[in-house]
Image: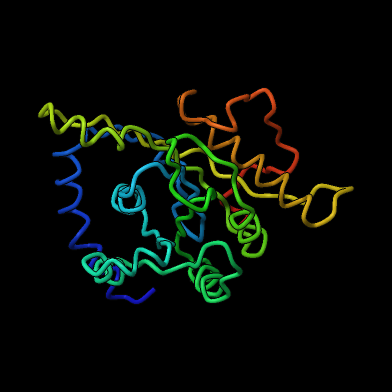
Amino acid sequence: MAEWDRGFRRIANPVLRVLFNLLYKVDIRGLENVPKHGPFIAMMNHIYFVDPVLVGVLAPRYIVIMSKIENYRILPLRPFLHVYGCFPVRRGEMDLQAIRTSLAVLEQGDGLLMAPEGTRSRSRTLQEGLDGVAWLALRSKAPIVPVAHTGQERLGHSAIRLRRAPLRMVFGEPFRFRRPEGLDRQEQLRLMTTEAMYRLAELLPPEYRGVYSDLEKASSQTLVPYEPDSQ
């Protein structure tokens, strides 16, 4: 992304951190799991509209945010998305421009924030993951860092009671994918996505795990621990 995006973040993020700490009782864990250098994909659960900005502000590295194109039609929001280093994606179709932008972000060594469910979960629990994250990780060879956060959806309820909402954000251990044998390409992507989603579910309290609630079904056939020296 453009250098002025980074400049805006250097000014905006300290202000937003103060604001978020006024609104939330923030508990962040696993910051050491975010690679210190090189590209990575931050894979988050999505339960509240402010989730992407929370990750962008509280993560220890610059992360470019993929945002649904509908957000760019909200006039008060559009300028912020541009200056904060976001880019639009058209959901439910093969958005070639979003794919090119995602690969460019990773090629220049930055983080990329994605919600593998494709949209915000109205039930606040994990929905079935889509294969876009796995595809991009394979294509770019970038490691994936699962990011699980909970509590932000209680902001309104807590504000009424003049209390800060309890926000918990966990950055999980990074991993890469390897292709399993005996499966076609689509089956490989589906298995990779499922195994990655279970990694995300493991970081969440049981009531947030949704379709990935049964952790006994989790496997790691396609997952490889990330080694920084392997980049």
Is residue 77 found left or right of 37 in the rendered image?
left
- Residue 142 coordinates in the image, percent (x, y): 58, 58
**Left or right of 126 in this view: 153:** left
Compared across the picture, whether 191 is left or right of 140 comes to right
Q: Quadrant of residue 140?
A: bottom right
Where does residue 110 sit, x and y in percent of width and height?
A: 45, 63
Q: Residue 59 appears at what percent x and percent y?
A: 35, 49
Depth order, front residue of 88/64: 88
Q: Of 197 and 105, which appears nearest the observer?
A: 197
Which corner quadrant holds the N terminus? bottom left
**How far across and down, in percent of the image, does residue 187 sit?**
79, 50
Identify the residue at the far left of this view: 162
Please state the total of marks drawn on the protein image.
0
How has the structure been colored for display?
A: rainbow
Q: Which residue is drawn at 15% across and 46% down?
A: 19
Residue at 48% x, 69% y is 105
Residue farthest to the right? Answer: 182
Looking at the image, residue 50 lies above or below residue 65: above
